């Protein structure tokens, strides 16, 4: 059974490394600013549950999904990282084989370049994949436009509004984090979400 | 355009909501005005365009 907020929740399937942090921070801010709630496997902190269970439940509870398959390079052992394509597959499966509610799932898929994915996951041929070129502002624009089209919510603000507010937010973030005695280079996902929530609440009142 | 409603979620965090509210208080005043004079280059710098790197 899906939570009441199913239609508002967006599953984020992306790398959680230092290099990806600027994009992840932009994604989370834009999701909240568009009136949705970001979810990831990092949202829940329960050591008694295995990672796959958390991922499956998070996917089940989210109507929307953002999947970034841009980090597929080989590691030092010449092995690719399969987590993101695997979780994208679960999302596709939920939509294909799930109940009536699961069938209305909607996804945004990112890669660095638009057609690069055909070289490593050709089964996705024909699927509309967006390029972001590792640019957080491109990510914000494509995320905003996708949400506007797929949700049909007229309350979603324009791209320029979101970017202007994000610039101010990211400028203030180091001082906010410092006041909270957190490390700007290692903000826990849930803490970052809480900061964004309160910052947007303040921005909307200003 | 109707006003957007901020959706929030209860999460397990290492800082309290009250502490975060305190940390953001006094900031983001006249948010939309402050960035109007900034150009695209400053925008890209502050948003932190990143290079491609495997995790």
Image (cartoon, rainbow, N blue to C red):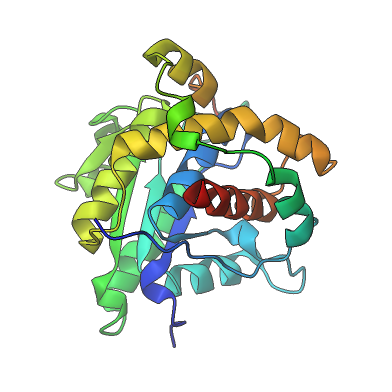
Q: Residue furthest right?
A: A181
Residue A199's x, y, as percent? 59, 47
Residue A11's x, y, as percent? 45, 60
Is B32 or A114 nearer to us in this picture?
Answer: B32
Residue A160 is at least partly visible in this image: yes
How many discs mark residues in the rendered view?
A: 0
Which residue is located at x 51 percent, y 46 percent? A206
In screen coordinates, is B40 left or right of A82? left
Q: Quadrant of the N terminus of chain A?
A: bottom left
Judge whether B24 appears above or below A139 on screen. Answer: below
Residue B13 is at least partly visible in this image: no
Residue B33's x, y, as percent? 44, 29
Judge whether B35 appears above or below A144 on screen. Answer: above
Residue B8 picture quarter? bottom right
Is A131 or A196 nearer to us in this picture?
Answer: A196
Is A94 or A61 nearer to us in this picture?
Answer: A61
Which residue is located at x 36 percent, y 38 percent? A161
In screen coordinates, is A57 left or right of A123? right
Residue A135 picture quarter? top left
Judge whether A102 appears above or below A108 on screen. Answer: below
Residue A7's x, y, as percent? 36, 72
Judge whether A159 appears above or below B2 on screen. Answer: above
Which residue is located at x 81 percent, y 44 percent? A180
Q: Residue furthest left?
A: A126
Is A53 or A189 nearer to us in this picture?
Answer: A189
């Amino acid at each position: 059974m899906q939570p009441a907020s199913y239609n508002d929740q967006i599953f984020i399937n992306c790398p959680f490394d230092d290099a990806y942090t600027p994009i992840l921070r932009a994604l989370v801010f834009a999701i909240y600013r568009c009136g949705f709630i970001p979810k990831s496997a990092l949202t829940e902190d329960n050591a008694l549950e295995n990672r796959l269970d958390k991922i499956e439940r998070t996917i089940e509870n989210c109507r929307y999904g953002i999947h970034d398959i841009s980090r597929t390079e080989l590691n030092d052992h010449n092995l690719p990282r399969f987590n993101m394509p695997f979780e994208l597959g679960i999302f596709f499966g939920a939509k294909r084989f799930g109940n009536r509610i699961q069938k209305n799932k909607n996804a945004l898929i990112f890669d660095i370049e638009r057609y690069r994915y055909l070289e490593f996951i050709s089964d996705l041929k024909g699927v509309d994949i967006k390029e972001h070129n590792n640019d957080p502002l491109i990510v914000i624009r494509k995320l905003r436009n996708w949400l506007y089209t797929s949700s049909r919510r007229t309350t979603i603000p324009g791209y320029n509004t979101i970017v202007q507010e994000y610039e101010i937010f990211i400028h203030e973030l180091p001082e906010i984090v410092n006041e909270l005695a957190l490390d700007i280079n290692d903000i826990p996902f849930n803490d970052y979400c809480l900061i964004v929530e309160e910052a947007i609440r303040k921005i909307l009142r200003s | 355009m109707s006003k957007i409603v901020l959706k929030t979620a209860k999460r397990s965090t290492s800082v309290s909501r009250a502490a975060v509210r305190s940390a953001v208080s006094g900031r983001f005043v006249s948010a939309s005005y402050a960035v109007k004079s900034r150009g695209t280059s400053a925008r890209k710098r502050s948003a932190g365009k990143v290079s491609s790197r495997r995790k």
